[in-house]
Image (cartoon, grey):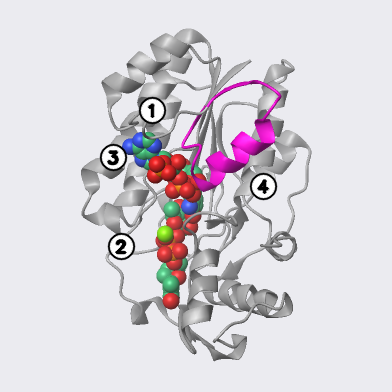
Amino acid sequence: MKLLITGSSGQVGTELKQQLAGQDELLTPTRADLDLANASAVRAYLALHRPQAILNAAAYTAVDQAETEQEAAWALNAHLPELLARYCAINGAYLLHYSTDYVYPGTGSEPRQEDSQTGPLNHYGKSKLQGDFAVLAQCPQAVIFRTSWVYSAHGKNFRNTILRLAKEKTELSIVADQIGAPTPASLIAAISVQTLQRYQQGQPIAGGVYHLAPRSYCSWYDFAKIIVQQAEQQGQSLSLNASAIHPIPSSAYATPAKRPLNSRLSVDKLECALGIRLPEWQQLLASMTQ
Ligand SMILES: NC(=O)C1=CN([C@@H]2O[C@H](COP(=O)(O)OP(=O)(O)OC[C@H]3O[C@@H](n4cnc5c(N)ncnc54)[C@H](OP(=O)(O)O)[C@@H]3O)[C@@H](O)[C@H]2O)C=CC1
Ligand SMILES: Cc1cn([C@H]2C[C@H](O)[C@@H](COP(=O)(O)OP(=O)(O)O[C@H]3O[C@@H](C)C(=O)[C@@H](O)[C@H]3O)O2)c(=O)[nH]c1=O
Ligand SMILES: [Mg+2]
């Protein structure tokens, strides 16, 4: 099958490319090959290459920058998914799309279900929610994985930021009142491959939104502490001790974009659809070797 992976240099895209290598015919255009913010260039690319499935791992993910670069965020997060979904609907192609916990308002303390009320607090979340609506309106068979707090060995993510800061600083203050689930890009890719295989075997899971994250939760503060403890255990030379990481409320950490406090995602729907049990975040982080 001819597969298009967009954003193949990103965290999720890199893992998808690795995990799908050799199995299918892969199209993995870079930004230099194709500017995904340019709708007519994307239409021409699709018309030329005619993929049979699209894994849309491209996005505008700079949350604070999206407050001022709204047009760029909307081009990638809302308009591109709509265009890809229309192509898939017209051409009978399969679409896997990725979304975020930031589409929810973060109220309460219960895990969110896929049909829970949305209400993004920032422009990144608003643009992603618009993308989700557009995908399902154009192509109801599409699968949207809403994930959270993505990290991988390579790329821009919280784990790499903390590992860098742990070599530069002796004290760190990290928000302890935002709760969610850190998700390795490799897990997202593995579940995506499984979902694609179900489609290829003629047994696709139902179209719609699924939460894709580990089944346990923590705060960014908890996550930072374990990241540093793990680096200490692996013998990395750090200037920061895990006991010098201090919990702070979000109100003490000013950022241009507001973040949700409760990012707990219920993963029952995905576990049931695929007949799997998702791991806990601690177990997944422990298996990171670099
Ligand atoms: N990161 C996170 O914490 C979370 C991410 N998600 C969602 O998961 C998905 C994957 O995210 P992640 O892997 O972290 O994203 P990354 O930011 O790591 O990667 C984004 C990708 O999109 C590409 N891209 C962006 N703009 C353009 C453009 N104009 N033309 C061509 N390529 C472009 C980037 O290319 P280049 O390398 O050239 O910049 C890169 O390959 C996204 O839908 C995201 O919203 C959901 C929850 C959490
Ligand atoms: C570096 C640092 C961050 N923080 C806080 C800020 C923020 O609330 C939290 C995480 O920081 P980040 O900049 O990684 O957060 P952010 O970029 O908002 O992460 C989000 O990215 C998008 C793409 C998503 O879809 C979300 O699921 C989520 O992963 O930690 C501190 O409290 N102290 C620090 O020293
Ligand atoms: Mg970020």
* Magenta part of the chain: 5-27
Which mark sits nearer the N-terminus, 4 or 2?
4
Q: Report the Cα–Cα distance between label 1 and label 2.
A: 31 Å
Cβ atoms under marks 3 and 4 closer than 8 Å: no
Instruction: State the mark number for residue 33.
Output: 1
How far apart, in angstroms, are the residues tagged by discs 3 and 2?
16 Å
- The answer as to whether callout 1 falls within 8 Å of ligand 1 is no
- The residue carrying mark 2 has its beta carbon less than 8 Å from ligand 2: yes
| Three-letter amino acid code of the residue under disc 1 | Asp
Does the numbered disc 4 mark a residue whose Cβ is under 8 Å from ligand 1? no
The secondary element bearing badge 2 is classed as loop
Amino acid, disc 2: Ala
Reply above or below: 67 against 96.
below
Circle 4 SS class = helix
Crowding near pointer 3: few (<14 within 10 Å), some, many (20+)? many
Q: CA distance from mark 1 to mark 3?
A: 21 Å
Task: Give me the disc on residue 74.
Answer: 3
Of the numbered discs 1 and 3, the one sitting upstream in the chain is: 1
The numbered mark, 3 or 4, whose residue comes first in the sequence reads 3
Q: Nearer the viewer, mark 1 or mark 4?
A: 1
Q: Position of residue 161 (x, y in %)?
A: 48, 68
Query: Viewer-proximal residue, 171 or 131?
Result: 171
Q: Is residue 116 visible?
A: no
At a point 78% along the width and 37% down the height, the residue shown is 275
- Name which residue lies at 53% across and 65% down: 160
